[in-house]
Amino acid sequence: MTSAAPSSAALPDRLCPRDGTRVPLADPAWCCPACAGPLDLDFHPVPGPPAGPATSLWRYADILPPAAPGISLGEGGSPLVPLTERVSAKLDFLMPTLSFKDRGAVLLVGLAQRLGAREVLADSSGNAGTSVAAYCARAGLRCTVYVPESTSPKKTEQIAAHGARVVRVPGDREATARAARAAADKPGVFYASHVFHPYFTQGTKTYAHELWDQLGGRLPEALVVPVGNGTLLLGAALAVEELYGAGLIPHRPALHAVQAEAVSPLARAWREGLDDLGGDTPAAPTLAEGIAIPRPPRARQILAAVRATGGAFHTVPESAIAPAQADLAKRGLYVEATGVACWAAVREGALGDTEAVVPLCGAGLKTGMAPAGTTGP
């Protein structure tokens, strides 16, 4: 299942979006050595007609950076189904590990394999860690995943089932990230950060490329995306720029970001007209655990991406999450609480009559149904 890693000479560099620092992809540094911020990939493909089966992420291999398709679990090609006359849902909870994170994890773990990593380390609120653990199992790589102690037991069980070591960290998601980063600099360790490493976003961009494909060479008026660390939104923004730059869409669809009202630092910065986060946002209990991120490292990029497309930020109160989850279940779609955030916003009229697509990002099996009337863990 594993093969000899090819030379890293053909791999693109990483580039700091803030100060221009260039870091070779094979360099073990996981952040910018100058500002400690996340890095982007100096990779600018021009999309053309996709090739290969429509049910595979690898249909878009020509616009993906070098990876290892041999560790594929069949990710990609999630269905698009209507919810109303103007709103459709893309069922990314039907991915191999039951969340959209497989789009990025398959590229990230494939890169770790190419670079000859001895161990992969990740931090996650659950779904990204599960996905990295699964692809590490497929690639034959040792894996350790740091999670907050409050992470759903069903998610930690899934991570461990793939053979990864689970490290539960007291405190919130930020404390978990700090603990993981402290362990990320050991020799031979590849830090598979779905936030800091740009390979992950290169994978999530296939979400919007698939939509363009499924809609017959166009995108809807609005892409509505749940945002914690922003990996799906930034991937969608990357795809939009690629499609627009290649002349394959006449204009950019508006990106609408949804946060849980309980933890909404980006929405607050947006309302205040800021280019970055403005002060600390305390961690608060929320059913949408997967987007409860008080200080997303790519905040500046997320805010800029939404503004560039004429989109907006929306917040969902806790009282709206359980009803939205139950509503989707009655429509035959069993989705975890975080994954219903966008539908919760749209069904309350946040976008009016705008044509939109919402992602259903994680399966209900990961958390179960939130009892009616609940307002947080």
Image (spheres, rainbow, N blue to C red):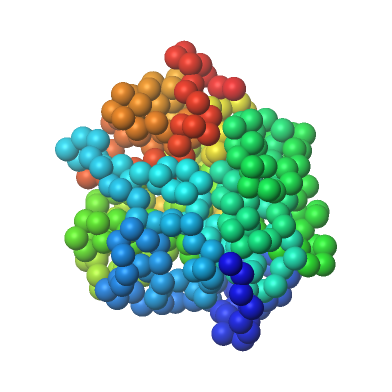
| Residue at the spot 59% in from the left edge and 32% down from the top edge | 154
Quadrant of the image occupied by residue 148: top right
Q: Locate the C terminus and report the quarter of the image it occupies.
A: top right
Residue 293 as seen in the image, left or right of residue 353: right
> As displayed, is residue 104 above or below residue 116?
above
Residue 191 as seen in the image, left or right of residue 304: right
- Residue 9 at x, y percent in the picture: 61, 86
Q: Locate the N terminus and report the quarter of the image it occupies.
A: bottom right
Query: Can see residue 22?
Result: no
* Residue extending farthest front: 1
Quadrant of the image occupied by residue 169: top right
* Residue extending farthest top: 373
Total labels: the figure holds: 0
- Residue 129 at x, y percent in the picture: 62, 47
> As displayed, is residue 212 above or below residue 318?
below
> As displayed, is residue 67 above or below residue 137?
below
| Residue situated in front as seen by the camera: 293 or 70 | 70
Query: Can see residue 267?
Result: yes
- Residue 85 at x, y percent in the picture: 17, 38
Residue 132 as seen in the image, left or right of residue 348: right
- Residue 186 at x, y percent in the picture: 82, 62
| Residue at the spot 35% in from the left edge and 50% down from the top edge | 78
| Residue at the spot 78% in from the left edge and 67% down from the top edge | 188
